[in-house]
Structures are given as structure tokens and as C-alpha cells.
Image: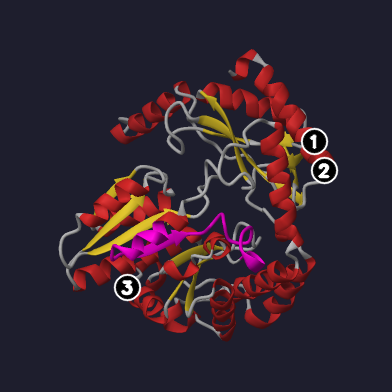
Amino acid sequence: MISPDWIHALQAARERRAIEKRDRARTTVAPTSAVHVTRRGRPLIDFSSNNYLGLTHHPQIATAMRAAIDRVGAGAGAAGLISGHTVFHERAESAIANWKGTAGAVLLPSGYQANHAAVQALAAIGRDTGGVRFLLDKLCHASLIDAVRGSGAEYRVFPHNGVDKLSRLLADRPAGQLQVVVTESIFSMDGDAADLRAIASLKDSHDFLLLVDDAHGGGVYGEGGAGLASELGVAAAVDLTVTTFSKAAGVAGGAVCGSQELCDAVINHGRGYIYSTAVPAVIAVGVEAAIDVMRREPDRATRVRQLARRVRDELGIAGASPIDSPIVPILLGTEESALTAAAQLESVGLLVVAVRPPTVPKGGSRLRVTLSSAHSDAEVRQLIDAVRAVRERPSAT
């Protein structure tokens, strides 16, 4: 039998990835606590997850979800517009909106889907009016880029935090065309922040809608973890916020938050919501419990920010803004250097993942260290010493 061409293509692609040190594969881990896993039979301290507040194992959240599952079952069984929207979803969405300070919220299975639903809704609004143009920060998450490209709408990319360029783009907008500025609050690979105050100030002279993906800011910044815009005092300038509950909140799912009119648009035009089975009600229960914990235990956010400042300061990378983001990039340059460094850290009991292109630009391969309030001082000390040792080795330069 002749081997099909597509098999040869797959093999060639994988060989090319292997040569470029960009091939990816999963290795199974077994979590044993909020910041500890076992991998390949070896216990490791986990500095790779986005479990910033250590809530994956919080007893209040786990208890609430265990108590709920006998009542609500394992799955939703239908989309939210059919019969998948329960009283538990309604309660969770009310809690989310209250937490974010918005009139409404729509709960979805993931942050990725939430970004797609938000963009799809705004693209639909544009089609019904004078058109729409999305203006994206260059370092926006792949889910935002994919959503905008998939919408078929016009878009432009401005340099990372390039507010001057953004202002010029807004000034050049066609009459009647909806302008949507899209950014993250805390960027997922560099751990730096959008200049939300400067972007918000552009509303004094330009007409646009602001969409902020707060996936890595929610839970860490703002009163009760309400997010970076809340902490900076510019939440009123943000029209749509996308937040996730799989990171600081320790559960799963994502949400689009904004005015009731915009949330209605997501329900009616967001294909990521319309054509997806609803989040299981037990997840909605977990989300509501997690928000309660974040509000009642602010010391968790305080601690992870203190740890971030310590790590950045001791590793000499405190110049990034903000200096207390729990995402700490250790730039190494080449794919091979990053892979070697990650293996060296694993050999001393630390799980830190090498991030390589296309997730980051060519030449930007790195270790992406993520901190949690559940890490002990001794574990953070071990991380700092190990990263220093890796940096000093010629193989990691």
C-alpha cells in the first residue's frame, strides 16, 4: 500500500520541529498539593502553573464543589441557551459581576472561548452599524489574535504598550466605524502590565470600546482580586473584561463582564457561547466559592506579590513593570538553552517550563517562572539559588 502524502508531511514537520528544538510533547504529572507534583516518579516543586493564590486545593472551594455534585450532576448537558443555564450559573454570574463591578457577566467553559465570544459579539455589532476595526497590542494572547482573525473584521496591531501609535490609529478611524482597543492587563509571557491609565486617558479625545483580558491580573490585583483596572482606578473606562477562573481562582472557566447590553450581545452573537455546552454547574459553584475566598483572604494576593518582588530583585530583573507580577521570565535566547535550563532545574527538584517559539518570538526562548502564595520561603530560596546556578553555566547562555 502506498503511504499517503499527508503522513509524509506530518513526519517531515515533526522532524523539522525536532531539529529546531520546538517539538512539544506532554508528560503526565500527579498533583499532590497546590504547588507540588510528581512527574516521572519524582516529587517536584511546581513553579510552572498559574495557581497564583494556591486555590486549587482550598478546602472551602473543594467542599462546596463536593457538596454540589450530588445535587447538580457532573455535566450541564446542553448549551446555555437550551437548558444548560441553571440557578447555579445565574448565581455565579451575579457573583462575578459584583466582583468585577459590572452590570453583567456571562460564564463560559474557558478564557479562550470567552475571548472568542467577546470578539464575535463586537464584530457582529460592527456589521450592524458602520463596521468595526480591532486595534491589538502586539503581545496580545493567541486567543485574542485568533478570535479577531477568525471574525473576518479589519484589524491593526500597535507596538507593545505603544500608546502614541494607538492614539494615531484612533485619530485616523473612518467615520462611523467602531474602534475596539484590545489588550491584556498582565501579559502572559513577560509578566508586565498594559498601560491602562494611558489607554483610558485616550477616551478623553477618542471614541472607542476597550476590551481587556484580565486573565493574569484577576485575583492578584485590586480589592478582593477584582483586577488590575480596579487597582489602578480605571475600571470605569473598561467596557468589556474577560477573566478566567483557571488561574488565580484555581477552578475552571472564563467570563465576559460588562454592561448588560454588551453581555446580551455576547449571548446573542458570541458563537463561543451559543454553540458550546454550558460550564458544568459544579464548576459554577466552584467559581462562586473561589470569589468568596479571594475576597475574604486578601493576604494570599499580598504574599504572592511580595514573593514576586523578592525573586525579581534577587535575580536582577526588577526593572519590569509591575515588579510584583507573579510571572517572572528568565530570558535565555535559544530553544536549546531554555530546554537545557529546564532539565537542570528539574534535576534539583523544580518544575519550570521552557517556553519556545512560536509562543514567544525567535530568540526569546525562556524559562517562565510562576509564583504562588502557597510556595514557602524555603522553596523560593531554592528556586532563586537554582536559577542563579543555571545562569552561570555556559550551556544556558
Which residue carries the number 3 mark?
Answer: 269
Q: Residues within 10 Å of mark 3 (few under 14, many from 20)?
A: many
Q: Are marks 2 and 1 in contact (CB under 8 Å)?
A: yes
- In this picture, residue 45 sits left or right of residue 192: right
In the image, residue 102 sits, relative to residue 132, either above or below, namely below
Disc with the residue nearer the chain's start (2 vs 3): 3
Which percent across, then down, holds residue 221? 61, 59
- Picture residue at 47% right of the left edge, 83% below the top: 83
Report how many numbered discs are placed on residues in the image.
3
Quadrant location, the N terminus: top left
- Picture residue at 75% right of the left edge, 53% below the top: 303
Q: Which residues are magenta?
A: 199-225
Asked if residue 205 is among those painted magenta in the image, a careful observer would answer: yes
Which residue carries the number 1 mark?
Answer: 381
Q: Judge by depth and name the residue closer to the eye, 345 or 327.
A: 327
- In this picture, residue 79 sits left or right of residue 343: left
- Which one is closest to the eye, mark 3 or mark 1? 1
Which residue carries the number 2 mark?
Answer: 377
Asked if residue 343 is among those painted magenta in the image, a careful observer would answer: no
Q: Judge by depth and name the residue closer to the eye, 364 or 203.
A: 203
Q: Furthest residue to the right?
A: 378
Q: Judge by depth and name the residue closer to the eye, 76 or 358.
A: 358
Q: Hey, what amino acid is under mark 3?
A: His
In the image, residue 356 sits, relative to residue 304, either above or below, namely above
Which percent across, then down, holds residue 49? 64, 47
Describe the element under mark 2 as helix, strand or loop.
helix
Q: Hey, what amino acid is under mark 2?
A: Asp
Q: Judge by depth and name the residue closer to the eye, 127 or 178.
A: 178
CA gap, disc 2 to disc 1? 6 Å
Q: Hey, what amino acid is under mark 1?
A: Arg
CA gap, disc 3 to disc 1? 49 Å
Residue 54 in view, yes or no: no
